[in-house]
Amino acid sequence: MSGQTPWQTVGPFFHYALPWKGGADLVEGKGDAGARMDLLPDGHYTLNPNDQPRGAAKGAVVTITGTLFDGDGVPIPDGFVELWQANAAGRYDSPDDTRAEVALDPDFIGFGRAATDADGIFTIRTVKPGRVPGPGNSLQAPHIAISVMARGIIKRMVSRIYFADEPSNAEDPILDLVPPARRATLLAVPAGEGHYRFDIRLQGDGETVFFDI
């Protein structure tokens, strides 16, 4: 008897256990953006950590849409993208961020999850983050930290989303560590007013840069 194939080692179960209603909309925390609602049991949204009433988050609203591809270039219909970011002023909703001089936004928690749909497409609606401190008293360019999970992945894959039209990318100390030929895999490309395109490739040609944690 043969053992499990790589595709059977983990998942597919993410849409049943981890997304929540409105989890991909960090601006208002409601709606079905990026979630496979057809795969969520009734009442599953009660797991939403944003279940307290909130107003609209402050800042420039952006929508990021992309496709999650496997190593063969095939879209993955049962993955998800988790995100964590600073608010528009550049402060995290975290006890570790104690910078009183940078304002918190009570309506923005900076955390969400977007499930891929049947075509491997995910959508994130959020605000463009402000710049946050980096190594050596530097400032990082606006970015969103992401984790990717999908079938066959034992450990989450960690990366970042930067904005291709952001001038401060040239000063970012983390982007500077990435070989120039591969930096484009971390850049969300403008695709209309307030919209960006960001595809994620787990392996193969154009593989997204992932970071060790």
Image: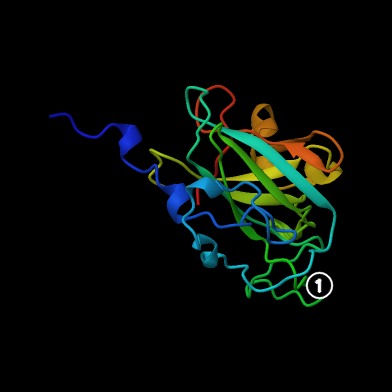
Q: Position of residue 107 (x, y in %)?
A: 75, 69
Residue name at image x 38 percent, y 45 percent: 154
Q: Is residue 34 visible?
A: yes
Look at mark 1 in the image and give the residue it sits on: 103
Callout 1 environment at 10 Å: few (<14), some (14 to 19), or many (20+)?
A: few
Q: Position of residue 164 (x, y in %)?
A: 79, 37
Q: Is residue 174 visible?
A: no
Residue name at image x 17 percent, y 29 percent: 2
Q: Position of residue 176 (x, y in %)?
A: 70, 41
Residue name at image x 55 percent, y 46 percent: 36
Q: How many marks?
A: 1
Residue 5 is drawn in which quadrant? top left
Q: Describe the element under mark 1 as helix, strand or loop.
A: loop
**Which residue appears farthest toward the left when viewing the image?**
1
Query: Foreground: 161 or 66?
Result: 66
- The quadrant of the image that shows the N terminus is top left
Q: Position of residue 66 (x, y in %)?
A: 65, 36
Mark 1 residue type: Ala
Q: Is residue 206 above or below residue 208?
A: above
Query: Foreground: 148 or 178?
Result: 148
